[in-house]
Image: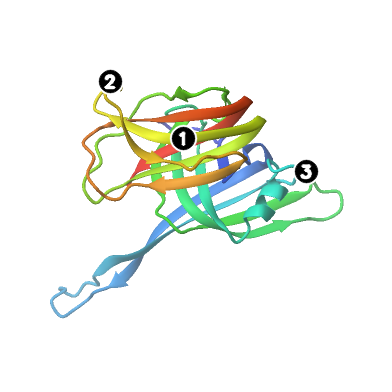
Amino acid sequence: MGKFVLLDARLFAPGADLSGASNKIELSSEIEDKETTNYRSGGWKEVIGGLGSAEISAEGQWEAGDPSKVDDSSWANLGGQGPYTVCPTDSVVGALAYITSGMRADYNVGDAVGEVAPWTGTVKSSWPLVRGQIAHPPGTARTATGLGTALQLGAIPAGKRLYAALHVLSVAGTTPSITARIETDDNAGFTTPSTLLTFGAATAPGGQILRGDGTAVADSYFRVAWTISGTTPSFMFAVSLGIR
């Protein structure tokens, strides 16, 4: 990816796509430095990495009225934990995505008379910030059980984990339910798939985030699969994956 102008960044809160209400999205990550200087340091300060942290800050135009709007989503998640996915360019399958589980730490609204009603908010990470890809795009409605596109993320070394975030953005139908899972295989055709992670059944907009247990996984291909039930069900959802 070369240099580009920010035109279509995406922000997914637990169960809402806030991209259309955002005009600024910033993502930061840092590792705390801990000094280990001693008499054998050769006259130079020595440091090692301590605790890591990440933060997502965003702002844009205020809207309210249903769970997909920024005000409804912000109030519902303020002080709570959930998955967040940020994409710098787009949210098509394979697009670059940054993933974390974090706490919605603050939410601010309002400005002077005559101004477009604004909002600002911040998310503080509770899990590592993970660099990954979009495995399922938000703009494709799913009405039946199906399989996503294979992504080659590479094998998972021992001590590393697969992180997966599910954002259920809209739900329709009578008693609709979707259960998504992350499958792996050693080939793009998924001739012998194995299930690595399984999300809980979802019947309403919301978000979930899962991670592996640190066991090595030799498979290098990953995809999302889903089982849908109900009468005339329809789901819009986004899934992001990454290894760290």
The quadrant in which residue 176 appears is: top right
- Residue 218 lies, in percent from the top left, at 21, 36
Residue at 49% in and 24% down: 145
Whether residue 7 is visible, yes or no, is no
- Disc 1 or 3, which lies upstream in sequence? 3
Q: Who is closer to the viewer here, 89 or 186?
A: 186
Tell me, yes or no, whether the two marked residues, 1 and 3, touch with CB atoms within 8 Å: no
For the residues labelled 1 and 3, the Cα–Cα distance comes to 28 Å
Identify the image quadrant of residue 32: bottom left
**Residue 230 has which mark?**
none
Q: Quadrant of residue 198?
A: top left
Q: Nearer the viewer, residue 2 or 205?
A: 205
In this rendering, is residue 5 above or below 78? above
First-in-chain label (2 vs 3):
3
> Are discs 2 and 3 less than 8 Å apart at CB?
no
Query: Mark 1–mark 2 contact, CB under 8 Å?
Result: no
> Which residue is under mark 2?
191
**Residue that mark 1 sits on:** 180
The crowding category of the residue bearing disc 2, from other C-alpha atoms within 10 Å (few below 14, some 14 to 19, many at least 20), is: few
Say which amino acid is labelled 1.
Ala
Q: CA distance from mark 2 to mark 3?
A: 45 Å
Amino acid carrying label 2: it is Thr
State the residue position of label 3: 65
Q: Is residue 77 left or right of residue 161?
A: right
- Residue at the image point whose x is 25% and y is 72% from the top: 45
